[in-house]
Image (cartoon, grey):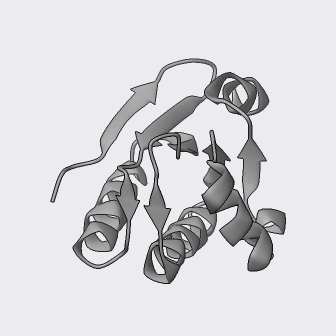
Amino acid sequence: MSSYIYKIIEGKSQIASIELNELVLGGNDALEFSALLYGLFDKGITCVIIDLSKVQVMNSSGLGMMVSGLSSLRKNNIQMALVSVPAKVMSLLEMTHLDKVFQIYKNMQGAYEKYS
């Protein structure tokens, strides 16, 4: 299991970015993802930007991991945005109508401009 790449972008507001791996399949990765998000709650983060550019496969458990993350962040008044969503993943989001739930941007710059 490889760790996610994450960093905090300093600016007018505190933004964290998380780059997901090629496979988003839930399981142990979901536990690691949740722990990473919980670790951000007390850092003054106002938005978490999830970079999906490297994702090649996402299953229903991976999708559940994302929805759970969104729910946890919202409970703590933190926004979540998805960026660089591959076509396969976008199809999954559209099929499940989650494209209406997540804030989706073409690239990191678009999301950063919105939330900074």
Work out whether 87 lies above or below 105: below
- Place of residue 77 in the rendered image (x, y in percent of width and height, measured from the top left): 64, 58
Q: Is residue 17 or residue 87 the one in the foreground?
A: 87
* Residue at (37% x, 31% y) in the render: 7
Using residue 66 as the reference point, say whether residue 95 is left or right of it: right
Work out whether 8 lies above or below 70: above
- Place of residue 109 in the rendered image (x, y in percent of width and height, measured from the top left): 68, 22
* Residue at (43% x, 42% y) in the render: 18
Q: How many marks?
A: 0
- Place of residue 90 in the rendered image (x, y in percent of width and height, measured from the top left): 70, 58
Q: Is residue 106 or residue 18 the one in the foreground?
A: 106
* Residue at (57% x, 42% y) in the render: 49
Location of residue 5 (image quadrant): top left
Q: What quarter of the picture does the N terminus occupy?
A: bottom left
Using residue 112 as the reference point, say whether residue 36 is left or right of it: left
Work out whether 46 lies above or below 70: above
Using residue 56 as the reference point, say whether residue 80 is left or right of it: right
Work out whether 45 lies above or below 14: below
Location of residue 92 (image quadrant): bottom right
Outermost right residue: 100
Location of residue 41 (image quadrant): bottom left
- Place of residue 23 in the rendered image (x, y in percent of width and height, measured from the top left): 36, 60
Outermost top residue: 11
Q: What quarter of the picture does the C terminus occupy?
A: top right
Q: Is residue 86 or residue 98 the one in the foreground?
A: 86
* Residue at (51% x, 81% y) in the render: 60
